Amino acid sequence: MKSFIEVKPDSHFPIQNLPYGVFKLKVGNDPVCGVAIGEYVLDLSMLEEKGFFSNTNLGKEIIFETPSLNKFMQKGRETWKQVRTLLQMALSDENPILRDDEDLKKISLIPMKDVEMCMPVDIGNYTDFYSSREHATNVGIMFRGKENALMPNWLHIPIAYHGRASSIVVSGTEITRPKGQTKPANAETPIFGPTKLLDFELETGFFVGQGNLLGEPIAVEDTYNHIFGMVLVNDWSARDIQTWEYQPLGPFLAKNFATSISPWVVTMEALEPFRVSGPKQEPEPLPYLRSKGNWAYDINLEVGIRTLKQKEMFTISRSNYKYLYWNICQQLAHHTVNGCNTITGDMMASGTISGPDKDSYGSMLELTWRGENPLKLPSGEERKFLEDGDTLEISGYCQGEGYRIGFGNVSGKILPAK
Ligand code: MN
């Protein structure tokens, strides 16, 4: 499959991908939906206006001339597949419908440099899982010692907490260093001030397409049809605030000041060729969590840092989504097993994705082992945690034969506390 639009082999956005996003022109217009193709954004609202989707389940409904993907996500897998097939056909080098229509190309294909990406989804609810065994073990060793590293429930339950949807921001949004209560190890009483231990968490997240009614769990074998696509997630974390507040009820202000996501939602259809088997689950999970088949995904993940002195992005971690212990089907089945309802646009993040090796850890906490082994940057600087002026970037892609299914990246620059 090849597009009439030139796409380089290392591009994240070939015709096999076609991720969905919401964009506006830098010169100004209302945000609308589009797909990424090479260095271009295909404006779906323009195609919609021309009646391009009228033979699909979408009919003449206005779906893409809106500032979020929610309307489309609500339609379900059958329609997602129809639209994807139609778009691949229209962008193919063998089909004249768009290739030879200079006027339509002019108004619907926009260079990426001319657009600003917006939040792709109107996110109603946000849940953050804790599904990497390596990450949970590392954190457990640091905070409780080697003997009690993994909590007794961890191998039985996909552990998660309810996060905050209102502070999820799109890539490029600057992050202000949060203030809060901390208690230094040797102090009797807590103090208030800017966090000293600002961290990132390398994660991905999936979006619920069609939700479920209150009281009606999604069976593990039905979960896949409820999942629309995935993005990269940076779950910014203030470790000193977290240490003081997290017991007995879990994460709160250490997490809810900001969470960043990448702007392009990669569909499960595009990711399909990269499904691989996940880690062996021992002990066997309870029957409601038994997913059949391969539900891990081979997604290469990379974390880079730029500082005021270190101008070139410097890679500090390489991990892979396939290391996750609990898969998306198990996460969604578990989330709803008690009857909890989900709605279109809910985001479920994976939890920090740490690999088995020291250079595959998904947080500064682990990479520097709580600051004991600072990272050395080519600029001569050292980092234990993130400092003001630092930019943290996560990127990810699946490597196919001669093409990549990419996520682009999610980045954020740290501003001083207010
Ligand atoms: Mn997290």
Image (cartoon, helix red, strand yellow):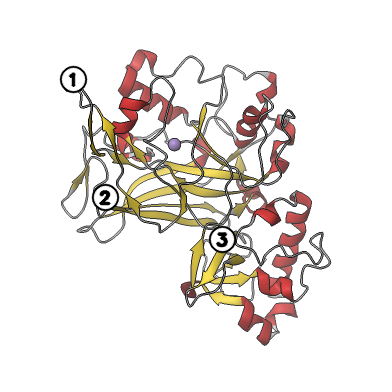
First of labels 2, 3 by sequence position: 3
Residue 177 visible in image: yes
Q: Amino acid at mark 2?
A: Lys
Residue at which label 3 appears: 403
Q: Residues within 10 Å of mark 2 (few under 14, many from 20)?
A: few
Q: Tell me the quarter of the picture where residue 61 sits.
A: bottom right
Position of 402 with respect to 81 (left or right) is left
Q: Which mark is residue 418?
A: 2
x and y percentages locating residue 247 in the rendered image: 38, 21
Residue at which label 1 appears: 188
- Mark 2, mark 3: which one is toward the viewer? 2
Check whether the beta carbons of the residues at disc 1 and disc 2 lie within 8 A of each other. Answer: no
Task: Name the image quarter holding the N terminus.
Answer: bottom right
Position of 86 with respect to 17 (left or right) is right
Q: Nearer the viewer, residue 48 or 297?
A: 48
Task: Give the alpha-carbon distance from disc 3 to disc 1, as whole Å.
Answer: 57 Å
Q: Tell me the quarter of the picture where residue 264 sits.
A: bottom right
Q: Residues within 10 Å of mark 1 (few under 14, many from 20)?
A: few
Which residue is most to the right? 55
Q: Residue at the spot x=71%, y=62% of the render? A: 63
Q: Residue at the spot x=16%, y=22% of the render? A: 186
Q: Secondary structure at mark 3?
A: loop
Q: Amino acid at mark 3?
A: Tyr
Which residue is most to the bottom? 102
x and y percentages locating residue 331 in the rendered image: 60, 32
Position of 303 with respect to 116 (left or right) is left
Task: Give the alpha-carbon distance from disc 1 to disc 2, as whole Å.
Answer: 26 Å
Question: How many numbered discs sit on the rendered protein?
Answer: 3
